[in-house]
Amino acid sequence: MNVYFDTLERRAPEQREAALMAALAAQVAHAKTHARAFAASLRDIDAARVASRGALAQLPVIRKHELLEQQRASNASDVFGGFSALGWGAAPQRALRVFASPGPIYEPEGSGSDYWRMARALFAAGLRAGDLAHNTFSYHFTPAGAMMESGAFALGCTVFPGGTGQTEQQVQAMAALKPSAYIGTPSFLKIILEKADELGVALPSLTKASVGGEAFPPSLRDWLLSRGIGAYQSYGTADLGLVAYETSAREGLVIDEGVIVEIVRPGTGEPVPDGEVGEVVVTTLNPGYPLIRFGTGDLSAVLAGQCPSGRTNTRIKGWMGRADQTAKVRGMFVHPAQVAEIARRHPEVRKARLIVSGEMANDSMALHIEVAGSPIGLAARVADSVRDVTKLRADVTVCAPGSLPNDGKVIADVRSYR
């Protein structure tokens, strides 16, 4: 059996990087021409020069709250806030469907086979032409159900659109139709199997699963394996489609071939060294919705080396938490971007972590900074910068390089909320 979706997965890394960087310059040019928001934010950028990761890192990061703000500010003829090349009516390209995620944030779907590129993840999870896939992602408002269904169709699978909830009916449908594959959240699969046990219904046909939408702990993976089901993660968003996927090696998630992924320091657009935890920022090569440097708000880190499965693209560790670490201290909001600004003011500071402790209404801040050596007076100067940037006071502790946790946290809120 072929274990690779296509030849792209085994390209030489330098060949892939050259292709991605060439496509990046073209995508930036396309976004400036066809998406009003990028025409404004990138108006001073020469698209032809954005052909390296260094050049990409100089562009602004677009975060979800900005999409929401732009969409709310736009008139009814541009519900996507100027970020999409798709629309309806007089728009250059017709959107096939429109979805709404909580916010609401509206996302367009263009036409074409496997628009969201999910077939690659489903293939890595073992799905093949002729499989019946029981899809329990939502078909209502949000795109998850349609995203996975389009990928399954591209593989030649038949899909049962189970949607969410109605656990007993899900069991009955599985018992009658005998699907070989499940698509949905891992926790709902566990609920379905436990309900089947309660009803005395065997589901031996179910042997493979593509799961996503939430964390997938090893304990649940092993529990499913004990039931004869090999489940593999996919990681994507409603805005981007597929970002990365798990393989049979079960060592991190391999990045999809249709995106460029950066890991940046939370609150900034600055890439971190490989292995350091930061926010996942994605540039999609989708011409219909050409998001350039979209901040997912998710934390992850690059894994060293190539996947043992033989796929040569970069791997990430998977979901490691959320990057939005804003804290309210003594009535004032403190943001990761402010911590980054404080560090920028002092070149000696390699890394900074703000710890908020105490109890609500009686809290305190301490900024821990990694510094080589013991520069005289640095702690006092940094404390002054904290006060200037946040309007709050903080104790400053100087730490040795490498001593702060590698967990992506810029602000650690350890207060008691009793």
Image (cartoon, rainbow, N blue to C red):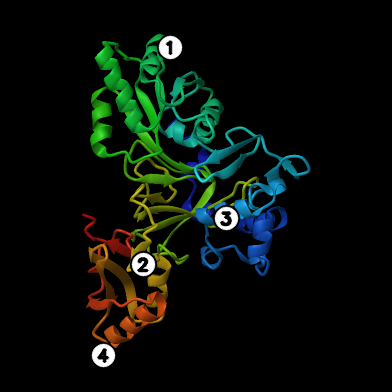
Q: Secondary structure at mark 2?
A: loop
Q: Residue furthest bottom?
A: 376
Structural distance between the alpha carbons of marks 4 and 3 = 44 Å
Q: Nearer the viewer, mark 2 or mark 1?
A: 2
Please report whichever mark, 4 or 2, sits nearer to the chain's N-terminal start.
Answer: 2
Q: Which of the 4 quarters of the picture holds residue 329?
A: bottom left
Q: Nearer the viewer, residue 280 or 90?
A: 90
Res. 290 mark: none
Please report whichever mark, 4 or 1, sits nearer to the chain's N-terminal start.
Answer: 1
Structural distance between the alpha carbons of marks 4 and 2 = 33 Å
Three-letter residue code for mark 4 = Ile
Residue named by callout 4:
376
Structural distance between the alpha carbons of marks 2 and 1 = 57 Å
Q: Nearer the viewer, mark 3 or mark 2?
A: 2
On screen, residue 395 above or below 29? below
Three-letter residue code for mark 3 = Glu
Residue named by callout 3:
69
Please report whichever mark, 4 or 3, sits nearer to the chain's N-terminal start.
Answer: 3
Task: Name the residue located 61 percent from the left edge and 56 percent from the top edge.
Answer: 22
